[in-house]
Image (tube, grey):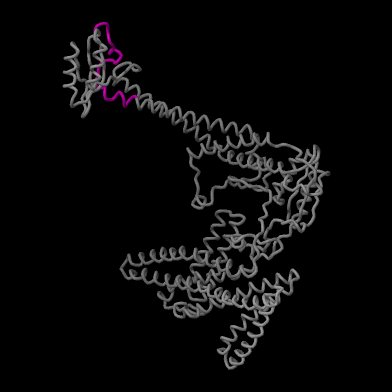
Amino acid sequence: MAISEMRRVAVLGHESEIGDVTSALQRLGTVEVSDFNEDAAEAVTAGLACPCDPSSRLAQVDALLSEVKHSIDVMGRHRRLHKNVIENFTGYRLRLTDDEWESYIQNGTDNAHRIYAMARAVEQSLADLAAAETRIVTAIEFLEPWTALRIPVERFVSGKHIGLALGTAEARSYEEALVEAAETVPGLSWDVIAAEKDKVRLIVAYPMSVADDALRTLAQAGFARVSFEQYEGVPSDIIAQLEQDLQSVQAKREEIERDIDALVEERPRAFALYDSYTLERARLEMIGKYGGTERVFAVQGWVQLKRLEELRAALEQLADDIVVLDRPPRDDEEPPVELENTRLSSAFEPVTKMMGYPRPGSLDPSPFLGPFFLIFFGLCMTDAVYGIIIAALAYWLIAKTHARGTGRQFLNLLIMSGLATVFVGAMLGGWAGDLLQRLFGWRTAILFDPMEEPTKFLILSFVLGVIQIYAGIILKAYDNVRRGDWASALFDQVFWLVFLTSIGLALGGGYLGPNGPAIASAGRKLLLLSAVGLVLTQGRNQKNPIMRIGSGLLSLYNTTGYISDVVSYARLFGLGFTSTVLASVMNDLMLRPAGIPIVGPIIAAVGLVFGHLFNILINIIGAYVHSSRLQYVEFFGKFFEAGGRRFMPFGMSTKYVDVENAKGA
C-alpha cells in the first residue's frame, strides 16, 4: 500500500545481442528506458555513443506498416467488422493463442506484400468497374432521347452537296427561329425527330455551298449541334448493347465481391502483422535510445525493485556476457512513480491517478480514500437495488471485455461501489425507492428513513466529513513523523486536531448527557490552550517575534476553511435525498395505472423498470463525480503531494490483437 520502490538499472552486452535484449525487455515490460543522449552523466555509460543506426530498417517497417494499414482500411470499407455492443465502445480486440500469433506473423514481409497486392487489385478493379459503369450509364442517358431515330447515326454525315446536322432547340421558339434562318440561308430545311416539354430534337439539312453561314445562323437561332461520332447503329440498338455491357459489369462486380471475401479472410493475419510491425517499430525506436561502442551496447532506465531479479534472470540467461547493474536513485533524481497496492485497494488507483501521481517518497492515498469513497458513493445512491444493478453490470462488463489495467481497476471500483450501495441502501431502507413499502407495506429501514428523518441524514453527512478531514490531518502527521519531522507533526497537525476537537466540545458538549456541562467547560479550556499553542507555533518560521505572533493569530482564520470543508459534505445529503425522492416519485407515477385491467400491470412494470434505470443513470454520474471531488479537495488537500511522473515501462502495446506470451515479429 505504497509507492513502489525504484532502482536505476543499466544493461551492458555485446552488440550482436542488442536485438534479443530489446525483445526481452519488450516482452517483460519491466524497464522504463531512458534516452542515453539525454542522460550522459551515468558513470557506467559516459562517453559512449549509440552502437547502431536503426533508421534504415525503421523506414522499411514504416513502409510495411503503411501497406498493412491500407489493406485493413480497404477491408473495413467493404466489409465492416462485426462488433458487439461493448466493442463499439471499447474497440475490437482479436484474441489469439501464442501459436496462432506465431503462425500469422511468419513470412511477414511476403504476406504483407501479398495482402497489400490483393487490396490494391480489389481497389483497382472496383475503380475500373465504376468508371465503366459511369461511362455506360452516361451513354445510355445521352442516347435515350434519340430512340425515335430509326436510321443508323453514322449515316448522318454531310455529303458533297448537302450537309446534315443533328441537334436540339428550344421547343417554344425553334419554329420561328428556323423560319427566320431559312430566309437567310436558302435551301435550309429541318425535321423534328422527337419533342419534349421544353426541347425538340431535330435533323437539319443545308446546302454545302453555304455550310459555314448555315451553321452560324443555326447557332444564332438556338440550334445546338449533337455529335454521334463515337457511335454506330440505331440508338435503340446501341442502348440494348450498352445495357448488356452494364449487366456484364455487374457480373464482374460479383466476381470482385468474391475477391473482397478472400481479402477479408486475411483480416486476422493483417491485424497480427500490423501489431507485429508496431512492436518492431517500438523496438527500433528504443534501440535509438541506447548507448555503446562498436562492440558493446548499454541500456539504462528504471525498474521496480520487486521485479529487478526477474529482469536480471531473464537477460542473463540470453548470454553469459550480459551484465545488469543497479543502484538506488540519487538525491538529484526523480524516479517515476508506480502505485503498489493490494488487489482490493488497487481498485481506487484510478481515483488517485485522475488527480495526478504522488511525488516520489510521499504517501499513496489510494488505500486510505477507499472506505470513504465507497460510503460516499453509497450515500449518494441510497438504494440497494441500484447497487445490485451497478455491481452486476460492472461484473458483466469485466467478463465480456476482458478489461485490463486501469479499465479493470475502474470496473472493480464500480463493483465495490455497487456493493457499498447495497449496504447503505439496506441501512436506509432503499429498495427501488419505497417500492416494497408501497407493494407489501414493509418498512425496511434499519438506521433511519431519509424521507422521514432528513436531519439525521444531514448530520450523518457532516459526521463522515469530520472523520475524513481528521483522517487527512492524521495522515499528514504520519507522513511528517515518517520523515523525522516531529515538530511539524506536533505543531501543524496535533495542535489543529486538539483545537478543532475542543471547538466541538465547547459548542456541543453541553448536550452530551448529565456530564455535558463539565465536558463543555473542559472543551473551552482545551480550546484556549490549543489556540495559544497554535498562535505560538504557526509562525515559527518567522524570525521577527512580532511577525511570528501575527502569523500565529492569522492562522486561526484557517478554522473557517475547516468549517467550509465540513459543510461541503452536505452534498452527500443533497444527492442521496434527491435519489430517494426521485425513486419515490417514480414509484408513485408508475404504480397509478396498475389498477387498469390486463394492461395496467404491464404498463406499471415497464414504467418502473425504465424509470428506475433512468434514475440510476442520472445519479451514478453525480455519485462518482462528487465522491471523487470530496477526495480531491477536502481529503487530498490535507496531506497529498502531487507532482510524480507516471512509470511507463517499455512493453507490448498492440492495437488489434490480444495474445499471451507473444514473442514479437
What range of the chain is rendered magenta? 139-161
At 62% across and 76% down in the image, what residue appears?
554
Which of the image's four quarters has the N terminus? bottom right
Q: Is residue 645 above or below residue 540?
A: above
> Which quarter of the figure is the C terminus placed in?
top right
Is-magenta flag for residue 33? no
In this orientation, does residue 374 appear? yes
Left or right relative to 113: residue 26: right
* Name of the residue lying farthest toward the bottom: 514
Answer with the quarter of the image where residue 417 lies: bottom right
Which residue occupies 32% across, 23% down? 240
Q: Is residue 477 left or right of residue 428?
A: right
Q: Residue 376 appears at what percent x and percent y?
A: 55, 70
Rendered image quadrant of residue 403: bottom right
Kindly tell me whether residue 493 is visible in this rendering.
Answer: no
Q: In front here: 316 or 251?
A: 316
Foreground pick, 156 / 252:
156
Q: Is residue 151 magenta?
A: yes
Relative image position of residue 521 (x, y in whole percent): 61, 90
> Residue at (40%, 29%) from the top-left corner?
250
Drawn side of residue 616 relative to residue 233, left or right: right
